[in-house]
Image (cartoon, rainbow, N blue to C red):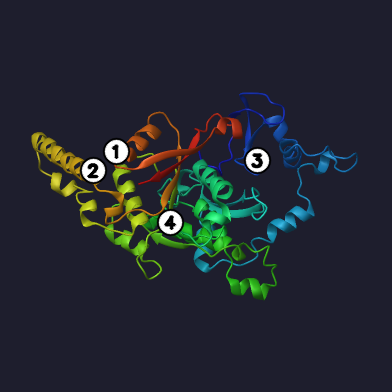
């Protein structure tokens, strides 16, 4: 499920503790949003936030029922200070398009040097003909928020500052932007159709330094002052040219310290391409034979069933031979040995998660589950699958 959906559903209320009742998920409360039944939802967001954080009871006369759901002037002013800069014409055009929305998502607050702060996420509401992007990547999925939280809590500035990081299948780019705010040098990648959306999200969250100076904005309050704006690049996992462009985006072909991705392990047809691309990004090496026959559509045209089976058997034999060869190459003698690691947030759906991990292990990766988030418990939403954060190393 995406993180920026607002819909009536059943869940477990965080305030009155009723289970399987109708209500909504309030995205502004808690780490991953929290579910409140319709009755508690009607009492207003400020009361829900106080209940969720177990703060002190409201003093007598400090808040009336009439203003329980209204923002204070301080809250409104603080919110507006984070997006004072105008967007370029291209971003304005995108935002004016039907079906495009902007929503505030809070991140950070786990460490003293990483205060709670808002991200402006531009995403698509997929309703009928209003769709602008024909891609499931034009939404903020729960894996993105889980991965963003993990980067803040488990890595932070100490591990990410100055490191080269690339996000695969970035979609709206939330985890990569969080990493950039923590000091990493980030490249956000996805298919060409989603580049305008990624560029729009970067523009919405990283103000140009010149604008910060001339507008008199406090540097600590400017999102642009936290890290360097990520670069955006197209990357088809089956394209050598795209891969080389990403590796050389800053003028020199060097490997990345981290490869990250959220909710990108659901399609078994691209597991091999994903793992090959990840390996190349961590080593800085691009081998033509790694991309051979990624798309055999033309080669398979006109073949009968027997010939197709023979072709498939030949491809599997080549894959097995390559894997067997890699097993006998000592890491110290490997021509391209990864120096970094991949960190992926994957939905734990029946069969799907296990299949991806099995494929990675068969390809020579070491798979380690770093943490597993039960979103039914953390969010009160039984419609959300658990999300596991896994590390891939060679």
Structural distance between the alpha carbons of marks 3 and 4: 30 Å
Which residue is farthest right? 61
Structural distance between the alpha carbons of marks 1 and 4: 23 Å
Q: Which mark is residue 323?
A: 2
**Going from the N terminus, do you reach mark 3 or mark 4 first?**
3
**Going from the N terminus, do you reach mark 3 or mark 1 first?**
3
Q: Quadrant of residue 225?
A: bottom right
> Mark 1 — residue?
362
Badge nearest the viewer, 3 or 2: 2
Relative image position of residue 230 (x, y in whole percent): 49, 62
Name the one closer to the observer, 295 or 43: 295
Q: Secondary structure at mark 1?
A: helix
Structural distance between the alpha carbons of marks 3 and 2: 44 Å
Relative image position of residue 57 (x, y in whole percent): 83, 37
Q: Residue at x 57, y 61 (%)?
A: 204
- Quick check: can you spot residue 203? yes
Q: Which mark is residue 257?
A: 4
Is the Cβ of the residue at disc 3 closer than 8 Å to that at disc 1? no
**Going from the N terminus, do you reach mark 1 or mark 2 first?**
2
Q: Secondary structure at mark 4?
A: loop
Q: Residue at x 52, y 64 (%)?
A: 229
**Going from the N terminus, do you reach mark 3 or mark 2 first?**
3
């Amino acid at each position: 499920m995406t993180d920026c959906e607002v819909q009536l559903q059943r869940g477990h209320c965080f305030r009155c503790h009723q289970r399987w009742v109708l209500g909504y998920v309030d995205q502004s409360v808690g780490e991953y949003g929290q579910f409140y039944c319709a009755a508690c939802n009607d009492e207003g967001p400020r009361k829900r936030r106080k209940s969720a954080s177990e703060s002190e009871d409201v003093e007598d006369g400090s808040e009336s029922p009439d203003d329980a759901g209204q923002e204070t002037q301080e809250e409104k002013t603080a919110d507006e200070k984070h997006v004072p800069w105008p967007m370029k014409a291209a971003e304005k055009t995108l935002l004016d398009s039907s079906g495009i929305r902007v929503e505030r998502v809070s991140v950070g607050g786990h460490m003293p040097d990483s205060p709670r702060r808002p991200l402006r996420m531009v995403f698509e509401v997929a309703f009928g003909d209003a769709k602008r992007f024909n891609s499931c990547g034009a939404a903020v999925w729960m894996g993105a928020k889980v991965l963003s939280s993990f980067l803040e809590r488990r890595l932070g500035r100490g591990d990410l500052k100055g490191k080269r990081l690339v996000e695969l299948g970035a979609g709206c780019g939330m985890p990569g932007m969080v990493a950039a705010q923590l000091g990493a040098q980030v490249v956000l990648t996805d298919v060409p159709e989603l580049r305008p959306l990624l560029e729009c999200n970067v523009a919405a969250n990283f103000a140009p330094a010149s604008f910060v100076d001339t507008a008199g904005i406090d540097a600590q309050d400017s999102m642009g002052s936290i890290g360097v704006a990520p670069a955006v690049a197209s990357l088809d996992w089956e394209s050598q040219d795209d891969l080389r462009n990403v590796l050389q985006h800053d003028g020199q072909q060097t490997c990345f310290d981290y490869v990250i991705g959220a909710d990108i392990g659901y399609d078994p047809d691209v597991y091999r391409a994903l793992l090959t691309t990840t390996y190349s990004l961590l080593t800085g090496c691009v081998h033509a034979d790694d991309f051979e026959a990624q798309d055999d559509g033309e080669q398979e045209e006109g073949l009968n069933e027997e010939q197709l089976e023979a072709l498939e058997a030949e491809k599997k034999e080549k894959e097995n031979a390559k894997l067997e060869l890699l097993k006998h190459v000592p890491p110290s003698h490997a021509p391209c040995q990864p120096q970094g690691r991949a960190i992926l947030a994957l939905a734990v759906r029946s069969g799907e998660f296990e299949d991806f991990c099995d494929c990675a292990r068969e390809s020579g990766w070491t798979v380690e589950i770093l943490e597993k988030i039960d979103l039914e418990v953390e969010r009160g939403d039984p419609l959300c699958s658990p999300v596991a954060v896994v590390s891939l190393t060679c």
